[in-house]
Image (cartoon, rainbow, N blue to C red):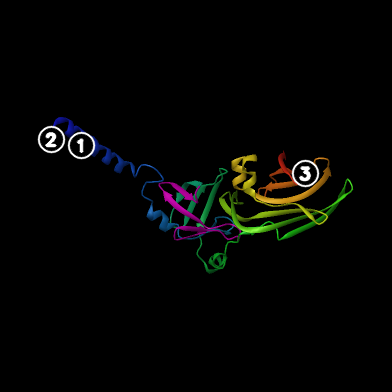
Amino acid sequence: MMNRCGLITMCVLMLAVLIGCGQSGGSAGLAPESKEAKQLLQGVWSDEETEVPIFQMRGDSVYYPDSTSMPAFFRVYDDTLYIGSTARYHIEKHTEHLLWFKSNDGELVKLVKNDGNEEKEAFENNQAQILSLTDVLKKDTVVNYNGNRYHLYVAINPTKYKVVRHTLNEDGLDVENVYYDNIIHLSIFQGDRQLFSRDFRKQQYQQRVPAQFFDQAVLNNMEYSGADEKGLHFNVSLCTPGDASCYLLEHVVSLDGQLTTELVEY
């Protein structure tokens, strides 16, 4: 026969289970998705005034007419449309053929469903592209300093490492653009002797720039800037694609092949 203490313990455990089950529907991340609303969203949605296609909802994904924006997963909970991992939009009005919601900049976006053949064609052959900021770029520089001749070799090589950048398109929607990062190789020769050789990757600068900037930046360029008693100076830029935001860092390779790095400016 169960004693009073054991009975209380069992009741507490049962209550915890019941509360846990009840909480599974209590937040946007765990609540049952509105399948009816999601079904109504299927199709091509165009601007109410201009009739320009804005996006197409197909299955669980939203597609954009431009080739630089990546498809994103979407969900509907209550009166909120979630696109991707970060964007959410308050739905003001939603019927079978109308969709009004607030964009991230506070504007009311008014869309109408338009499933004509011409509108569908804007999405049928649209494969999102991963962008590369540079082609393979090689630079050869000869420097004479203090009676010595140095040959500097810089190669900027695009990789398959992807950098995702979130931007607002002209309709105020958060979209993802994906870019290929670069690896930069630097070699320095003094006559026939190799003084220095190294590959530089974005990750080497992670501790020198803000985390939010780093996540959406690519290793952009390396330029020779001069020589002095400290050594040979090179400016390295870490930039946000499609933006003017860059951090400039300086590498100095001493005349005996030692490397130092410091942040120059933003």
How far from the left and from the top, in percent, is residue 265?
A: 73, 39
Residue that numbered label 1 is attached to: 10
Which residue bears the numbered disc 2? 2
Q: Earlier in the sequence, mark 2 or mark 3?
A: 2
Residue that sits furthest to the right in the current view: 147
Cα separation, mark 1 vs mark 2, equals 10 Å
Image quadrant of residue 182? bottom right
Residue identified by numbered label 3? 254
Asked whether 159 falls inside the magenta stretch, the response is no
At horizontal 24% and vertical 37% (from top left) the residue drawn is: 13
Q: Mark 1 or 2 closer to N-term? A: 2
The mark nearer the N terminus, 1 or 3, is: 1
- Residue at 36%, 49% in the rendered image: 32
Amino acid type, residue under disc 1 in the picture: Met
Horizontal placement of 177 versus 143: left or right?
Answer: left
The residue segment tinted magenta is 56-85
Q: Quadrant of residue 208?
A: top right
